Image (spheres, rainbow, N blue to C red):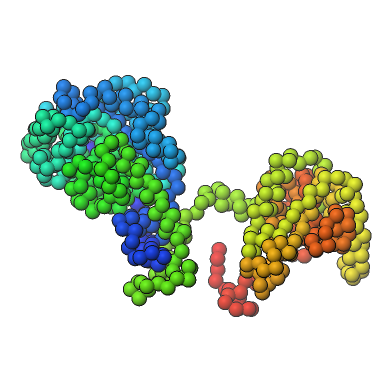
Amino acid sequence: MIPPAFAFPTPRPLDEHARVAAQSRLNQLTKPVGSLGVLEPVLCDLAAIQRRPIPALRRPHFLVFAADHGVATGRSLSRYGQHVTEEMVVNIAMGTSVSSVMARTMGIPVDVYDVGVMRKVRHPNVHVAKVALGTADFTRGPAMSTAECVQALSCGMNAARRAIEQDGADIIAIGEMGIGNTTSASALAAWLLDLEPSVVVGPGTGISQAAHRQKQQVVEEALDGWNEQLRLESGKWSTEDMLVAGFARLGGFELAAMAGAMIQAAALGVPTLLDGLLAGVCALWATRVSPTVSPYLIAGHLSPEPAHKIILEALGKKPLIQLGLRVGEGTGAMMAWPVLMNGCAVIAETATFADARVDNPFEEAHQPATAVSRSAFAESANPPTRNDFSEAERQAVYKVIAARRDIRVFLPDPIPKSTLWRILEAGHRGPSVGYMQPWNFIVIENLDVRRQMADVVERERVKAGEKFPNERRDYYLRLKVEGLVDAPLAICVTNDSTRGGPVVLGRNTIPETDLMSTSCAIENMWLAARAEGLGMGWVSIYEKADMRRILGIPDHIDPVAVLSLGYTPHFPDVPVLERVGWRDRLDLKQLVYLNRWNHVWEEEFE
């Protein structure tokens, strides 16, 4: 019986509203409806799994489990001797096996687990989690004890948990290595599907006819032993106990680990990309333990092994590719990964008929995506697309926005050129209408030039003060409005309204969008400076003609902003003008209208 301390985790519930919305979007893409074939229901499964109608897979992780099988000892059930298991595990770990070459080419991390290889694996990167030195010969009794089976299941569960929780995997690919494991897989398939061994036993590594007959014979013997055990003990077992006992009788350590990984991944809301027969029979067993694991399983390919097609039919799965692969070790999953990755790109990036302004010949047969999606989203707490930022990164963005200040007090310490360049690059990444990028950045380190700039600013500051009433004027003149001489450098941000030519996309009715764009670049620099621990102050009190003269700026170029940049002894908790009482921050609730001017949005958003 299953040890009391062990329990199978429950797969995370799916979001069926996201599935409906994903199918609706697929129907609206500029392609014939259903034309992505078997990929479309897989994408819809992924949407339900990730609880958003536009799924994304960016962190695949490849798990390979290895073990030896006692049934292969002294028998020619494979073209390879059992010593090859350890040698191939080393080959995989070195990145020189078929599957690990594929994984390396695609940048997929690989973790190899030894859960029962007879020999010591001679590679330091292999995770050693041996349950035993290979299973027992299942023609003479159980391949492993129930406790050993649970230990192997737990190994797979722990491996999946580590890949997902520590390494951030959003999909698990499964592979295996073990001489003789197709014999165990065939026995499991015959039991789970209630089929004769002759129907499910295949050639494996390409064995001779004599070896094939022997393989079929040992599967028959193993099933006879298991059926006798069932006759004697099944009344004492729960369904889970029976399933584990059957796996222990007929399976292998690496197979149990694979099944455990699939169940654990589903519990953490992560799909599993299956390989061939070995992964398929483990998936079939996992769905018998917990039927809701099924949507989390993706059939990578169809193996030539006769049992695999029957297994996929029983699972209700259609393979993504059919290339006649029979390498094993996860190669089918690796080969299918680009198909799945491209499918996610298609659903996210392909234009809809409406977006592309293409007549939709399927419009009458299918409800528009927007109507279905909005209804579905209303039922789901998740956003429609995946957030690329962790919670800590998201909070950091809002923190730097809230902590940004207009700084006037600076230290003279120099700014590292690499830091300055990052700030300038942040400005250059600002959005611009029609991608016109109308800005230039003049970095002013020369102190004499900055003194000239400060002089014209001071002149205009005094002139500006004359426009305020007496008390307000005195208050204003006490304020420090620039730090051009104190800071180690200044940056003049200019705007070229002619850049992009006389006709700029998106600018035909609002010509000042060039200035709006340059302002976005300035804000990017300001936020980047704050994130770098630097203060920035926007100096806006000057005649543009003076700045053109001092900095040699052409007449048609607009010197939009002069920015002081440097380290500051203190970042105020609130903006300086608020702290000194010049003006308070307005209440956002009074500034946001709904649908039309002056219609206050009264809904609470706390």
Residue 411, position as x, y percentages in the image: 81, 43
Who's the residue at 28% across and 36% down the image?
327
Q: Residue furthest front?
A: 501
Q: Quadrant of residue 537?
A: bottom right
Q: Nearer the viewer, residue 513 or 453?
A: 513
Residue at 45% x, 61% y is 350
Apparent side of residue 236 relative to residue 486 in the rendered image (left or right):
left
Q: Is residue 469 left or right of residue 525?
A: right
Please identify the quadrant where the N terminus is shown. top left
Give the position of the C terminus as an image quadrant: bottom right
* Residue at 30% over, 48% down: 321
Residue 441 position, x and y percent, is 75, 52
Residue 507: tell me if it is visible.
Answer: yes
Q: Is residue 65 left or right of residue 547?
A: left
State the image coordinates of residue 87 (x, y, percent, origin top left).
32, 24
Q: Quadrant of residue 519?
A: bottom right
Q: Quadrant of residue 6?
A: top left
* Residue 71 spot, x, y in % from top left: 17, 27
Number of marks present in the image shown: 0
Q: Which of the pair 191/208 is nearer the observer?
A: 208
Q: Is residue 273 above or below residue 153?
A: below
**Residue 599 horizontal side relative to residue 568, left or right:** left
Query: Is any part of residue 251 visible from this angle?
Result: no
User: Which residue is rendered at x = 25% and y = 52% of the image?
Assistant: 317
